[in-house]
Image: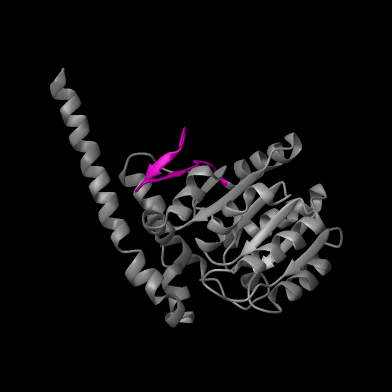
Amino acid sequence: MKNRVLIAGVGFNNVDRLELIGLLDDAHASGSKSQVCFVPANSVMAARKSAEVAHAYQQSEFVICDGVPVRWASLLLGTPLKERITGFDFFPQFIRQCANRKYSVFFLGAAPGIADELVRVYQQQFPDLDVRGVYCPPMTATFPYEENERMIQLINAAQPDVLFVSLTAPKQDAWIRQHWDRLHVKIAMGVGAAFSSEIGRIRRAPQWMQSAGLEWLYRFLQEPRRLFRRYFIEAPPFIGLVIRQRLFQKHSSSSSQHAY
């Protein structure tokens, strides 16, 4: 948690996109491993209910603000985060960096056929991109032991520098951390539905909606059944937690002043 911005129990790295890319390059060059988690408000709430999710965010090298509510919370708490960095936006930017830096990659997750189509698209855009493999696991809440072993063996046999995981947040973050010691990769990051977005299966909200913090509404209108729980049940309590944290800060500040 050192040098992180604490919001509702989750510590966020205060970096912008270019800084994050630079830090990942430095880590790769040094031979150290880095997990990157892009964390929206619903994942903050999940960390309060799941020890595995909380552990992932406590131990990951980079925990990044992926949500306007999280950035607004940082402003309210007086510790403004520099930028909201979504997995949607960072994924294609870092793919370009992988091609330029000759980092090999592996794509894990998404619906059947999505990663294969993504490879075809990227082979045209980035002929030098070294794709070591793709794998689409079955869609299930938790993977059985045999499936976890299969994924780990496939990834390690391919020996990629970078592992991109599309299993939805926070499941993808917890899965990476759960198997972190056995994954032979330099960098691993969960990027949500970015695979589908890159090939046009999911449309991004207009820029004005993104800037206004309404991208969640645009996505909900596209997938109401899948996203109803995330946006209308899991996320709203986040606001109450942030307000409580702000009130606690004010009380602590007031108490300190009276102590003198």
Q: Quadrant of residue 146?
A: bottom right
Left or right placement of residue 216 versus residue 174 in this view? left
Question: Considering depth in this image, is 180 or 11 the residue closer to the camera?
Answer: 180
Q: Quadrant of residue 115?
A: bottom right
| Residue lying at 63% horizontally and 76% vertically, measured from the top left | 138
Q: Position of residue 186 (x, y in %)?
A: 72, 46
Residue 76 part of the magenta-drawn span: no
Which residue, as the protein is rendered here, is positioned at the far front? 145
Question: Considering depth in this image, is 258 or 111 the residue closer to the camera?
Answer: 111
Magenta stretch, overall SS: loop
Colouring used for the render: one colour
Residue 86 seen in render:
no
| Residue lying at 48% horizontally and 48% vertically, measured from the top left | 55
Which residue, as the protein is rendered here, is positioned at the far left? 258
Q: Position of residue 66 (x, y in %)?
A: 49, 56
Q: Quadrant of the C terminus?
A: top left
Q: Position of residue 114 (x, y in %)?
A: 69, 76
Q: Position of residue 34 (x, y in %)?
A: 64, 44
Q: Quadrant of the N terminus?
A: top left
All told, the count of numbered labels is: 0
> On screen, 169 above or below 112?
above
Left or right placement of residue 91 versus residue 241 in this view? right
Residue 4 seen in render:
yes
Residue 11 part of the magenta-drawn span: yes
> On screen, 115 above or below 179?
below
Question: Considering depth in this image, is 150 or 44 the residue closer to the camera?
Answer: 150
Left or right placement of residue 93 versus residue 213 in this view? right
| Residue lying at 68% horizontally and 74% vertically, measured from the top left | 199
| Residue lying at 75% horizontally and 37% vertically, measured from the top left | 29
Which segment is the magenta one? Answer: 1-16
Which residue, as the protein is rendered here, is positioned at the far top? 260
